[in-house]
Amino acid sequence: MPFFNLLPMLVSSAFTVMGASQQQKVLKANAAWQRYESQLNFEYEKQKRLTAQTKLLSEQRAAGAASGVVVGTGSSLLAMQADMDEFENDMWFLEKGLFAEAKANDAELAGQISSTYFDAGTSLINSYSSYQQQEQLRESAELYGSGTQVGPSTVMSLSPRGIY
């Protein structure tokens, strides 16, 4: 008889462990797709900014040449250098933003996996507790009786005024 009380707990525990494992796989797969999407967005933004910077430098050279100034010397060189410094700074922050986003996603993933394991552990403990409670009820029923036997205190008496 105790085996039949234990069997549902074991089945429930097995499903809990399998579910937690599957959920962990799904969380990791979602995190991998998020990293991939972030990398694609980074590369796209980087290419967009590189194209814009190339266009800016080309416009500066054309404007300088049209005005008769020797391009790449004096103030035109300083302006080009300032624009390149700003561009490199933007690229640095863009790359660090990708790194920070990846670390934040990794921390979130770790939290979600921990939560999954915590929920699975709670479920296992609840299953074990339920099993223990069933065992105590079974032992109590064996010791004191199940309460389903009809005895003198449970027989209803009939009287002319009704059932008491």
Image (spheres, rainbow, N blue to C red):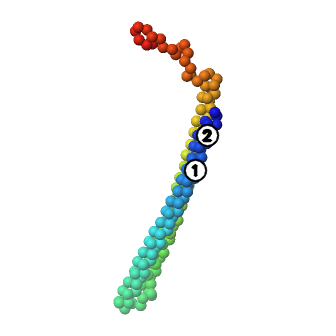
Outermost residue to the top:
160
Q: Is residue 78 left or right of residue 120?
A: left
Amino acid at the residue labelled 1: Met
> Looking at the image, is mark 1 or mark 2 earlier in the sequence?
2
Q: Amino acid at mark 2?
A: Leu
Q: CA distance from mark 1 to mark 2?
A: 17 Å
- Closer to us: 37 or 71: 37
* Secondary-structure class at tag 1: helix
Number of the label disc, if any, that sits on residue 103: none
Looking at this view, is 118 or 123 the one in front? 123
Image position of 23 with respect to 148: above or below: below
Q: Residue at x 44, y 77 (%)?
A: 50
The image quadrant of residue 159 is: top left
State the image coordinates of residue 49 (x, y, percent, origin top left): 43, 75
Q: Residue at x 35, y 90 (%)?
A: 66
Does residue 47 appear in this view?
Answer: yes
Q: Nearer the viewer, residue 112 or 148?
A: 148
Residue to which mark 1 is pinned: 18
Assess whether mark 2 and mark 1 are in contact (beta carbons under 8 angstroms).
no
Question: What residue does disc 2 label?
Answer: 7
Q: Nearer the viewer, mark 1 or mark 2?
A: 2
Quadrant containing the C terminus is: top left
* Residue 9 at x, y percent in the picture: 59, 40
Q: Residue at position x 43%, y 81% from top?
A: 54
Q: What residue appears at the point 61 percent right and 36 percent down from the top-left corner?
A: 4
Left or right: residue 150 versus residue 41 is right
Q: Position of residue 115 (x, y in %)?
A: 54, 49
Can residue 75 be seen at all in this image of the molecule? no
- Mark 2 Cα-neighbour bin, 10 Å: few <14, some 14–19, many ≥20: few
Residue 137 found in image quarter: top right
On screen, 49 above or below 28?
Answer: below
